[in-house]
């Protein structure tokens, strides 16, 4: 119960890493606002958590719109009485391709979800955290931000930005008692796996797994465990860290 009585907002919570983080947060005692564009799946996750005795409220919203984060803060206050944790998990990628071949619209979408959303979340949440002089922000970046691979240039760049933003936010918000950290997962068993690998077959999986010393993908459970630690008081002296949850891929 490391997050007992904490109130958290998790974006991209309807599936994959976001769902894993939300589920672990509830297990650790947190009350959670689940935010995602996929309304039916989002409500199913919330119903599952509540049926198991947790407290979760779904909010169907788009992270690229500032009004979405304002609505999330309002919902957290109305439903649970405040907000203590923000997890910027929502993210998208692109299929491997030469950097010059990515269409402008797709580039703009990647930057909107992976970059702009972090800014919008901060605009809505940081004033709350400053006022209460406490809070934790966790950005879900990627190993691509620290060890880029060819043909994912613009995705890698967006995650590198997120890591740099994490460090800058940590320094600026430390005097207010607010910690900011990041997680760098390797590709995992999520809806984005096929996109990152450029397909999904036993051969493609074997080739990718050969680059991970521990020999497996990141899982939602891995991310949930790491996120729960970094957002708990056990990590009270940790800020500005981008923790690799990658089975050794970046070594």
Image (cartoon, helix red, strand yellow):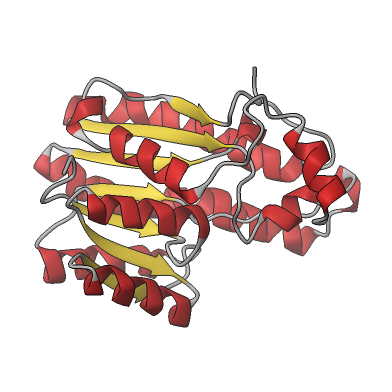
Instruction: Tell me if residue 60 can be seen.
Output: no
In the image, taking residue 113 as reference, residue 120 lies left or right, namely: left
Q: Is residue 141 left or right of residue 50?
A: right
| Residue in the picture at 12% in, 44% down | 131
Which residue shows up at 42% across the image and 28% down it?
168
Furthest-bottom residue in this view: 40
At horizontal 47% and vertical 27% (from top left) the residue drawn is: 242
- Across and down, in percent, residue 118 comes to 45, 49
Residue 37, placed above or below residue 229: below
Question: Is any part of residue 97 visible from this angle?
Answer: yes
Image location of residue 186, percent across then percent down: 61, 38
| Snapshot quadrant of residue 249 | top right
Q: For the image shown, how many numbered marks are present on the structure?
A: 0
The one nearer the camera, 246 or 79, is: 246
Q: Quadrant of residue 177?
A: top left
- Give x and y (percent) for residue 36: 44, 69
For the C terminus, give its image quadrant.
Answer: top right
Relative depth, front residue between 49 and 129 = 49
Q: Is residue 172 above or below residue 113?
A: above
In the foreground, 251 or 171: 251
105 relative to 221 in the view: left or right: right
Quadrant of the snapshot with the N terminus: top left
Indicate the position of residue 210 as horizontal and vertical percent values: 77, 31
Q: Residue at x 18, y 31 (%)?
A: 233
Task: Tell which of 107 and 138 is nearer to you.
Answer: 138
């Amino acid at each position: 119960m490391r997050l007992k009585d904490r109130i958290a907002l998790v974006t991209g919570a309807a599936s994959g890493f976001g769902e894993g983080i939300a589920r672990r947060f509830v297990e650790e005692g947190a009350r959670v606002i689940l935010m995602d564009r996929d309304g039916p799946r989002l409500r199913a996750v919330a119903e599952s958590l509540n049926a198991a005795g947790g407290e979760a409220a779904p909010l169907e919203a788009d992270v690229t719109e500032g009004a979405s984060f304002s609505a999330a803060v309002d919902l957290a206050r109305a439903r649970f009485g405040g907000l203590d944790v923000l997890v910027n998990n929502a993210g998208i990628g692109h299929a491997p391709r030469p950097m010059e071949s990515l269409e402008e619209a797709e580039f703009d979408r990647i930057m909107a979800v992976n970059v702009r959303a972090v800014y919008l979340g901060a605009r809505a949440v940081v004033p709350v955290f400053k006022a209460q002089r406490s809070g934790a922000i966790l950005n879900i970046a990627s190993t691509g931000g620290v060890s880029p691979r060819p043909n994912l240039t613009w995705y890698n760049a967006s995650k590198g930005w997120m890591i740099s933003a994490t460090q800058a936010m940590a320094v600026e918000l430390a005097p207010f008692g607010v910690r900011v950290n990041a997680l760098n997962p390797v590709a995992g068993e999520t809806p984005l796996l096929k996109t990152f690998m450029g397909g999904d077959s036993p051969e493609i999986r074997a080739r990718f797994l050969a680059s991970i010393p521990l020999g497996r993908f990141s899982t939602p459970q891995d991310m949930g465990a790491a996120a729960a630690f970094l957002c708990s008081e056990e990590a009270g002296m940790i800020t500005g860290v981008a923790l690799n949850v990658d089975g050794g891929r970046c070594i």
